[in-house]
Image (spheres, grey):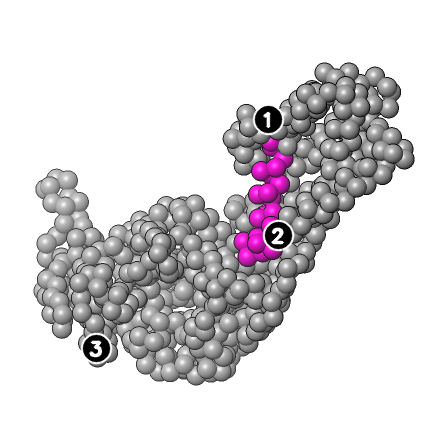
Amino acid sequence: MTVNSTAPAGVFAALRVRDYRIYWSTGLVSNIGGAMQGVALDWYVLTLTHSGTALGWVVGLQFAPVLLFGLWGGVVADRYDRRTLLPWTQTLYAVQALLLTVTVLSGHAPLWLLYVLSFALGCVFTVENPARLSFVTELVGRALIPKAAGLNILSLNVARLIGPAIAGVLIGAIGTGWVFALNAASFTAVLGGGAALCGRAARTRRRVHDLRSGRDLRGQLADHTDPVRRPGLRRRLQGARHHEHGPGHRHRRPHRNPTAHRNSTAHRNSTAHLRPNRPPEELPMTDRHTGLPGLHLALEADGGGAHPAVQLAPTTRAVRESAVSAEHAGFALVTFADAPLPPGTGPAPLGRIEAGTRAAYVSGLTDRIGLAPTLHVTTTEPFHLATQLAALDHASHGRAAWLVGAAAGADDLATVGRPPLPADALHREITDVVDTARALWDSWEDEAIIKNIATGRFLDPDRVHHIDFEGASFTVKGPLITPRPPQGQIVVLAPDALEIDERADVVLVARPTPDAIASRAAGARERGAHLVFAEVEVVLDTAIPAADRLAELNTTAIWPETGRLRHTGSAGSLTELLTELAQFVDSVRLHPAVLADDLPVLTDRVLPALAAAGLHHPPRPGDTLRTTLGLPRPANRFAAATTNA
C-alpha cells in the first residue's frame, strides 16, 4: 500500500502548485515592467535636469523608506492577510506608474513630483517586499520553499537582464512616457492573477474557519450520518442493533460487515467477563453505552508531522490548533508522542514540552476528544505516572488515555541514571508499571469522598486503600493522592511490540500490510485485547501529488520504514483502505506526514466520506472516552471487599 517515489522533483517543482504558478508568472511580468520603469525614470531625470545630484536623489528616495520604515513594513506584512495586502500594493504601484505616464506624456513633470513619486514607490516596496517573500511559504508549503526561493531569484535576474534592454529600445523608439505606460499596463496581469488567488483565498478562509469552529464540518457530518436525513443509514443501524450473538460469544471478527456489525450490543458486551465484580448498573444496557458505530479514528499530533523533515518543537499554538481541529473534524482520540531524548539530531536538538503537560493544556480547550499522552514506564516513577494520568482524567472530565511508552535505549535510560535493561527485565517492568497504575486508580473507591460538612469529614478512610505493590525494580505503598478517575480506569493504549495485549484496553498494531494487520489483530483479541487500532502513516494528494510531496520531503530527510502501513496517494484511496481495515480493527491511528498539509485533507475529504458510508461518527460532547469507544466503566477491585466487610 506504499507508493514509493525516489525521482527528484526538479528545480521547477514549485511550479506544479497552481497558485504559485500564477504568482510567479504574473510576478515575472511585473518585475520586467519594474526594471523597464527604473531605467526610464533614471533616463528621464537625467535628460530633464542634466544633474547627477538630481538622479542620486531620485534613486535615494526610492530606498530611503526601506531604511527608515523597514521594521514597520514587516509588522504590516505579518498583521494582514497577504492575499489581500499584495493586490493593494500592486494597485499602488500601478497608480504610481499611471501618474508618471500622465505627467511625462503631458510634458509637465516637475522635479519635486518625481521626488514624491519615487519616495511613494519606496514606501509601497517597504510593505510589499516582506509580504511577497513570506507569501511564498503559504503558496508552496515548507518542503518546496527552497525551490520557490530559487525561482523567485530567477525571476528577478531575468527581469534585470531583459527589462533594461527592452526599456532602452522603447525609449529610442516611442519615448520615455510610453515605457511608463507599458509598466502600468503590466499590472493588469498582476491584478488579474491576484484576483484568482483571492478567490481561492476566500474559500480557504471559509475552510479554516469551519475547521476551527467545527460548524460547517459538523453540518456535513450530520448530513452524512443523521439517520433522519439518511433513512438507509437508519435502517442499517437498526439492523445492526438487532444483530446478536449467543451467550458468552467472544467476537474475533476476521470478517464482518463494517457498516452494521460494529454497532452490535453483543459485541460491546463480549468483554464483560474481563471486568470482574461490575455491578448491574454499570453494564452497557442501552445503545448510548455501546459506543459509537464505525471506526474510532485517532490522530497522532506531535510536532509538525510524522516525517522527520518536519520535526518541530510543538509550540502551545500548534498543540492547541492540532487538537482543536482534530476534535472539530470528528476524531475520537488525539495522541501526543514523547521520548526521554529530544527529537531530531545535530548539535542543537529540538526541545519540547512533556506530553502529559501538552494533554493537560488541551483538556480545557476541548470537550469530547480523547487525550492520550505517551508516558514512558522506564523513565517515569510509577506513582507519579498514575497520578498525572488520573489528574488528566479529572481535568478532561473522563477523556484521558495513556499511550504506554517503554524507551529502553542506553541514552534514554541515561537521562535518569539507569543502566540498560535486558529484554526480560524490560518486559517485567512494563507489566509491573501497568499493573501498579491500575491498582492505584482503584485505591480510591467511588464513594470515598463524602464531604460531610456537619461532621467535618472529607473522605471515608475505609474506602481508601494501600495497594502494597512490590515489583522487580520498585515498590509502591499507595494510595494515590488523587481520587479515582471519572472513567474508573484510564484507557490504556499499548503498541503491539510491547506484548502486553491482555493488560491493554487498546492494542496498536503496526504492520506494513492489511493482511499482516488482520493477523496480528486476531492474535491480540485472542490474548484478551478489548479493542485493536491499526497504525497508518499517510501522505495525501494536495495541490502537489502525494508521491512528489514525499520525494521532496525525502530530499531533506529520508523517512525510514517504521513497520507501520504507509499510504501515499489520494483521499479517495485512503478512504478505500480504511474501509478495508474496518473488517479487522476497531479503529485506525493516523500519522500524517505533515500535519499542516495532510490534516485539512483528512478533515475535508476522508472523514466526511467515511461518515457517508456509515463508518465514522464524531464523539459526542460530554461523553467519556470509554463511552465513545464502547468500553464499560470497570468496577473498583476493592469495592466488593469493602461491601462485604
**Circle number at residue 446:** none
Kindly identify which residue carries mark 3: 422
Q: Which residue is mark 2?
A: 150
Amino acid at circle 1? Pro
- Residue 265 or residue 400, whichever sits in front: 400
Q: Is residue 498 above or below residue 217?
A: below
Q: Which picture quadrant has residue 134?
A: top right
Q: Which residue bears the numbered disc 1?
A: 65
In the image, 252: left or right of 142?
A: left
Query: Does label 1 or label 2 sit earlier along the sequence?
Result: 1
Does residue 110 show up?
A: yes
Between 32 and 559, the one nearer to me in the picture: 32
Q: Amino acid at mark 2?
A: Gly
Residue type (three-letter) at the residue carrying disc 3: Pro
Quadrant of the image for the N terminus?
Answer: bottom right
Where disc 2 sits, the SS reads: helix
Identify the residue shown where x is 78% and y is 31%: 40
- Cα distance in 3D space between marks 3 and 1: 67 Å
Q: Work out whether mark 2 precedes mark 3 in sequence or the reverse, and give the earlier one.
A: 2
Residue 218 is situated, as x and y percent measured from the top left of the image, at 55, 52
Q: CA distance from mark 2 to mark 3?
A: 51 Å
Sooner in the amino-acid sequence: mark 3 or mark 1: 1
Give me the residue at 54% from left, 53% from top: 142
Magenta stretch containing residue 129, yes or no?
yes
Q: Residues within 10 Å of mark 1 (few under 14, many from 20)?
A: many
- 502 left or right, relative to 286: left
Please identify, in this view, whether the residue under mark 3 or under mark 1 is nearer the observer: 1
The part of the chain drawn in magenta is 126-149
Tell me the residue at 11%/41% (across/down): 456
Q: Residues within 10 Å of mark 3 (few under 14, many from 20)?
A: few
Q: Secondary structure at mark 3?
A: loop
Whether residue 613 appears in this view of the structure is no
